[in-house]
Image (cartoon, helix red, strand yellow):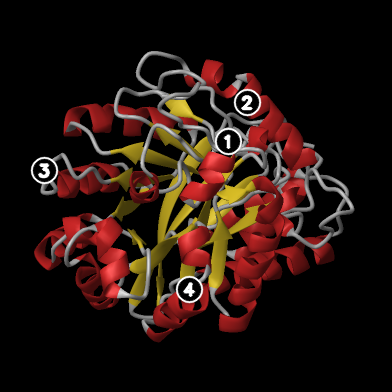
Amino acid sequence: MPEKREMTIRPYERLAGDWPTRFHLRVDPDGSGLLMANAAEAAWLSPVGVRMATGVLEGRNDDEIVEAVCAEFKGAPESQVQADLTAVHRLIEDLSEPGDDYPVTNLTDPTLSHWERQVAAPLRADVDQCDPERFRTMLAKLWDAGVPHVCIQAKRERDNAELMLLVEAAGDIGMICGIRAVAGCLSEPLLESCAMAGLDHLDLLFVSHDAAEHDEIAGAGDHEVFHAAIGWCRALELAPVAQVPLVDGTLVRMDDMIADLEALNVTNVVGFAIACPDDDAEADAAGALPARALPQVATTFFELADSTNGRYLWAPPKRYDDCCPLAEQILSGPRTSGDITIRVREDGTVLPPRGAEGVGNLLHDDWSAIWRHDAFKRYRERLKAPTRCPDCPDLPICNADCPKDPDGWSDDRLGGEAK
């Protein structure tokens, strides 16, 4: 076997018909890798697959690739190498036409890879909107760490014209880029300028199919702008994503919400539960979901996905904060969109997808020190041995943490441990 490599990210562009496909090939220390296409689909590759994909994307001919693979990886007959190379060609062709599927967001799916992995970094960072110069510094550190995808968390209190500069900063270094926002913060010209700067997807809060109920939380006129923004995304070839809060008030109208999204052809939906321990009667009364309810809520959520042929993603549950109105907690959205994502605050503080503990500061700490934190150690252990129990044998989210366990939620309580 070849020696272990340092982590690298290699950007490529490949023409598929009339449209180019942007590829990012991240090679982890054990030589295995992840190939992402147009911020839409991803596939794990063995070390041999990485070598083959590199050759294909660099335009080398098959004979040259086979010769190099046979020289580097001993033992496989040439006929098998030829067959594997054909499979890599087919994979790259499939990834070149991903439609508008949303990026992969959970590494715990056991079907993603047959190879033991030494993951060098998360695949996405949700970074709070901040000063462009500071943002560029954080992007450079993330890229050097091996993070190919950033999603800007738009802040109402900041100038939204700044968003285009942040998208441009991500595009300058070749990162996949998204924006998470409340629709009312956006306009068609702003979104068009962001698309021209390299924006790939737009994540929007969706509270209700009913305009009055939605606007009560998201702001006057937001429901109308949300519907308009989906049309803007289609015209600009951006992938629209709906972020749906899962609380008492939304569960009773979930069928209508999903029907509305289906009518808009929004197939990518992120559900984030705002949850509380079973014995927290005050939070339960405020609309948070008790821990015991989460498995059934998740089951219902994924059944809706099956019925609509949509791609529904479960964000780590968010612990209810009794020092903050529920509406504000809905507005702020999930900490991260999934288990492969970290959150980076404006001051550089890095938060893992779950728990209450910060793991370092991107502006001041070396990535190696951040990645060695116990929170990420536990994360890597879950990748190798997903947690499951006989209570919910078919619930995929249990691969990461039991949804009923508050220790597996994100905890950003203003009055609690995380700030």
- What residue do we see at 80% from left, 37% from top? 1
Q: Please, what is the three-letter code of the amino acid marked with disc 1?
A: Arg
Cα separation, mark 4 vs mark 3, equals 34 Å
Tell me the element at label 2. helix
The residue tagged 1 is 354
The disc, 4 or 1, on the residue closer to the chain's N-terminal end is 4
Q: Nearer the viewer, mark 4 or mark 1?
A: 4
Tell me the element at label 1. loop
Q: Nearer the viewer, mark 4 or mark 3?
A: 4
Relative image position of residue 254 (x, y in whole percent): 50, 72
Q: Against 415, is 69 above or below?
A: below
Q: Please, what is the three-letter code of the amino acid marked with disc 4?
A: Arg
Q: Nearer the viewer, mark 4 or mark 2?
A: 4
The disc, 4 or 2, on the residue closer to the chain's N-terminal end is 4
C-beta proximity under 8 Å, tags 2 and 1: yes
The disc, 3 or 1, on the residue closer to the chain's N-terminal end is 3
Q: Please, what is the three-letter code of the amino acid marked with disc 2?
A: Ala
Which of the labelled discs sits on residue 375, or is there none?
Answer: 2
> Which of the two residues, 218 or 235, is positioned nearer the viewer here?
218
Q: Against 142, is 333 above or below?
A: below
The disc, 2 or 1, on the residue closer to the chain's N-terminal end is 1
C-beta proximity under 8 Å, tags 2 and 3: no
C-beta proximity under 8 Å, tags 4 and 2: no
Q: Quadrant of residue 350?
A: top left
Cα separation, mark 2 vs mark 1, equals 8 Å
Which of the labelled discs sits on residue 159, or is there none?
Answer: 3
The residue tagged 4 is 253
Q: Please, what is the three-letter code of the amino acid marked with disc 3?
A: Asp
Tell me the element at label 4. loop
